[in-house]
Image (tube, helix red, strand yellow):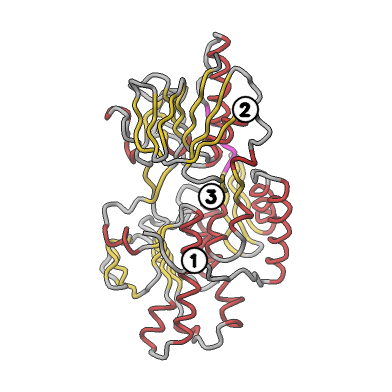
Amino acid sequence: MKKHILIVGGGFAGINLIKSLRNDNRFKITLVDKNNYHFFPPLIYQVATSFIEASNISYPFRKMFSNNKHVNFYMGNLIKINPGDKTIETDTGILSYDYLVLALGTESNFFGMENVRKNALPMKNIEEALYLRNHILLTFEEAARNKDIKQAEKLQNIVIAGGGPTGVELAGMLAEMGKYIAKKEYPEIKLGLSHLYLVDALPSLLSPMSDLAKKTAYEKLKELGVKIILNASVKDYIDCKVILSDGKTIETETLIWTSGVIGKEVPGLPEKSIGRGRRILVDAYNKVVETENIYALGDLCLMLSEKRYPNGHPQLAQVAIQQGKNLADNFKRIEDEKVLEPFQYNDKGSMAIISKYNAVVDLPKHSFKGFIAWLTWLFIHIIPLIGFKNKIQLAFDWFRLFITNNPSIRLILYPKRNT
């Protein structure tokens, strides 16, 4: 009998687990996801800023595994796990498993601020990125029609909460949109009223990265006209006013939320299996504590056993990719009755793009910036894309758009927000 591995979540962890097992006929694999496609989160901000199409960073699961007879796709949203019965409940049916792998990732953390949750604009998935794109474009159109100076300023102001890589990359992209595109395409708008704010509670941008990266990000964004506010956090968002922890307020109709994540809720797991940030506690082999035959991978899991990372691994794509591959090897070892290999993270560095031809790259023993770092960023972000067409199309679009400063996909296609 083939062992049935049920994988919930088709992100980096789930996909790499499947890739490593798909040709092993001892396993039957079912991937469960609420979407029918895999997407590449590091580039989602470029979808939100009308720079690339969503299809450039997305790929259908069924096409991805159409040549693998041991892999099936099941579209559904996880409702509950039943560990005793070895089943899961989804909104489209009930599935059984021999091994269950949870790789659902995270969602935006609004830290209990209800007004922010209701009115801020997160950017964790394709739908949210497209909504944000439409919101920005609709706001520009309204600003172009508006004759009231105070209202025009509120419409043109944009506040980004969170100074990590996503916030920095988004701020740089929006600043360059204003510099190269808004002046030409929105002549009715008085750009002197426009302000782009980047707010972070910590004393520096890109806090997990090197001093070189922090300094470069700060200086380059300042050059682009971004108003950087450090040592202050968003505390509320009422009547189009962002209220900061230092008492200051900013009037805006656009608060973009990139400030923190929390693990997606998985009903049915023991209470002792859940750690801080709602991440699922796992042992050195990614098995969920207090359970049998249930595993968790990627951003959703919290592993405290590796000495170099006593507080858990960073929530990065590379961790998820490596954990997926390691668990695949261990599933094979279980079948071969061999000793399991504990997970050990191989840190390959981190990077962020700041502006056109300018990025920062932190390798384990060396950091660098500028044009070479920008090329490195482009190259690294093309490699993981699934599908030859995605890689070629994205590379072509990138170089054309960076040279011309003229993306042409600013289409308002989904003006209604899903509730």
The residue type indicated by label 3 comes to Pro
Assign a secondary structure to mark 1.
Answer: loop
Residue 220 visible in image: no
- Foreground residue, 78 or 228? 78
Q: Residues within 10 Å of mark 3 (few under 14, many from 20)?
A: some
Badge 1 or badge 3: first in the primary sequence:
3
In the rendered image, residue 99 lying in the magenta stretch gets the answer no
Asked which secondary structure carries label 3, the reply is helix
Q: For the magenta stretch, what is the residue range?
A: 344-349
Looking at the rendered image, the disc whose residue lies closer to the viewer, 2 or 1, is 1
Residue tagged 1:
414
Q: Earlier in the sequence, mark 2 or mark 1?
A: 2
Q: Which residue is mark 2?
A: 20
Count of labels shown?
A: 3
Q: Earlier in the sequence, mark 2 or mark 3?
A: 2
Q: Nearer the viewer, mark 1 or mark 3?
A: 1
Q: CA distance from mark 1 to mark 3?
A: 20 Å
Q: Which mark is drawn over residue 41?
A: 3
Kind of residue at badge 1 = Tyr
> Does residue 15 appear anywhere in the picture?
yes
State whether residue 92 is above or below residue 417: above
